[in-house]
Image: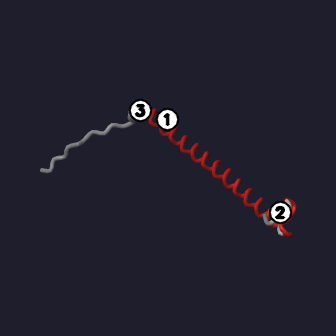
Amino acid sequence: MAFDSFSAFVAMEGHGPYVWACYAVFFVLMLWMMIGSVRSRNTIIDACRRGYEFQADKSKVEASSPPSASFARVNVSQD
């Protein structure tokens, strides 16, 4: 091992505060990104679920109500 003791490992010949601060920032940012990704994913899934429920409700309403207008084909002679 390159260090004589654990305290020497933590101090890293004076570079310890910089090194450990970099590790801390890295892990905090990674945690923040993971939590943000999960929250974003859940928001998107909920939005899709609401959209599918809206479409299902809309199709049920359309199926139960009669059409408001009827259209008939008109034959036009070309004479």
Is residue 17 rendered to the left or right of residue 50? right
Return the residue nearer the eye: 64 or 74: 64
- The residue tagged 3 is 63
- x and y percent of residue 27 in the render? 73, 57
State the CA–CA distance, disc 2 to disc 1: 64 Å
Marks 2 and 1 in Cβ contact (< 8 Å): no
> As displayed, is residue 9 above or below residue 52?
below
Quarter of the image for the N terminus: give it: bottom right
- x and y percent of residue 37 in the render? 63, 52
Q: Amino acid at mark 3?
A: Ala
Disc sitting over residue 37 in the figure? none
Return the residue nearer the eye: 65 or 49: 49
Residue 22 location, quadrant: bottom right
Q: Residue at 44%, 36% (x, y): give it.
A: 59
- The residue tagged 1 is 57
SS type, badge 1: helix
- x and y percent of residue 34 in the render? 66, 52
- x and y percent of residue 75 in the render? 20, 43
Q: Tell me which numbered mark, 2 or 1, is placed earlier along the sequence.
A: 2
Q: Tell me which numbered mark, 3 or 2, is placed earlier along the sequence.
A: 2
